[in-house]
């Protein structure tokens, strides 16, 4: 009997040159040509990118956000977290995995997530997380899951905030493209207190995207899981 693949557990060897090339191919040969029909994508803040590993933390407004983040970081090797529900389809599971992603439980930070994230950093890759825990509509920055801070502190990497705005709308008429803005903010030191990191991230993303900054009153879902 064939053993079922565990898409939540990845190793350093999985984050290799073939994964990187497939990711780049998907972005520049598939996503960009198609997206350019409907959107005018503008990247700003690239001067804030340094040649080091980051935990990239972006707001989440569509399923195409990972492609925009990968496009914005300009050739940096980047792994992604994807909700485990996407892996229920074997076709999606294989292709998402080939892009350098691994499955996560959005309700809590699990040991497999921590270990896979550490393996990505061990391989010299960065990691992209969407702290809101899912796609959000309404141009608001609300409560976020603190798991991204836990991972940044465990890996000793700074957090780079990224804002995405405009991808939630589209115009079917050719030559009437919707403007999409992807902005890279100032890096946030992982040595700050958790509450200060979350506050800094929310404020930067809200300002860059011109979104409403709502009170962070939702109970925190992610708990810091201890490695055995």
Image (cartoon, rainbow, N blue to C red):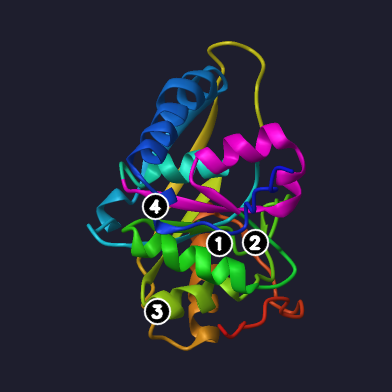
Using the image as rendered, state which of residue 101 and residue 209 is in the foreground: 101
At which x and y percent is residue 58? 52, 56
Which tag, 4 or 1, sits closer to the chain's start? 4
Q: Which residue is mark 4?
A: 13
Residue 18 in magenta?
no
Element assignment for label 3? loop
Residue 87 visible in rendering: yes
Q: Which residue is mark 3?
A: 190
**Label 1 Cα crowd, 10 Å radius (few <14 / some 14-19 / many 20+):** many
In the image, what residue occupies the spot 61% across and 57% down? 211
Spatial CA span between label 2 and label 1: 6 Å
Q: Considering the image in quadrants, where does the C terminus appear?
A: bottom right
Q: Which residue is mark 1?
A: 206
Q: Determine whether 71 is above or below 199 in the image.
A: above
At which x and y percent is residue 48? 29, 58
In the image, what residue occupies the spot 56% across and 43% down? 97
Q: Quadrant of residue 187?
A: bottom left
Using the image as rendered, state which of residue 177 and residue 3 is in the foreground: 3
**Label 3 Cα crowd, 10 Å radius (few <14 / some 14-19 / many 20+):** many
Query: Which segment is the magenta one?
Result: 76-102
Q: Nearer the viewer, mark 3 or mark 1?
A: 3
Element assignment for label 4? helix
Spatial CA span between label 4 and label 1: 37 Å
Q: Which residue is mark 2?
A: 212
């Amino acid at each position: 009997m064939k053993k079922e693949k565990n898409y939540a557990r990845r190793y350093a060897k999985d984050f290799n040159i073939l994964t990187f090339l497939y990711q780049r191919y998907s972005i520049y040969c598939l996503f960009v040509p198609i997206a350019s029909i409907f959107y005018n994508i503008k990247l700003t803040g690239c001067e804030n990118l340094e040649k080091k590993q980051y935990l990239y933390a972006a707001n989440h407004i569509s399923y195409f956000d990972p492609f925009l983040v990968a496009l914005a970081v300009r050739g940096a090797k980047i792994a992604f977290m994807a909700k485990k529900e996407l892996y229920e389809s074997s076709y999606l599971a294989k292709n998402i995995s080939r892009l350098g992603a691994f499955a996560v439980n959005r309700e809590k930070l699990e040991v497999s997530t921590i270990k896979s994230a550490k393996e990505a950093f061990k391989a010299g890759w960065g990691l992209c997380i969407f702290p809101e825990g899912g796609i959000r509509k309404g141009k608001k920055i609300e409560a976020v899951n603190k798991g991204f801070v836990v991972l940044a502190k465990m890996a000793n990497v700074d957090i780079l905030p990224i804002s995405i705005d405009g991808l939630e709308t589209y115009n079917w008429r050719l030559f009437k493209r919707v403007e999409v803005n992807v902005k890279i903010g100032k890096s946030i030191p992982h040595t700050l207190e958790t509450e200060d990191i979350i506050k800094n991230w929310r404020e930067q993303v809200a300002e860059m995207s011109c979104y409403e900054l709502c009170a962070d009153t939702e109970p925190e879902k992610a708990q810091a899981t201890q490695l055995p």
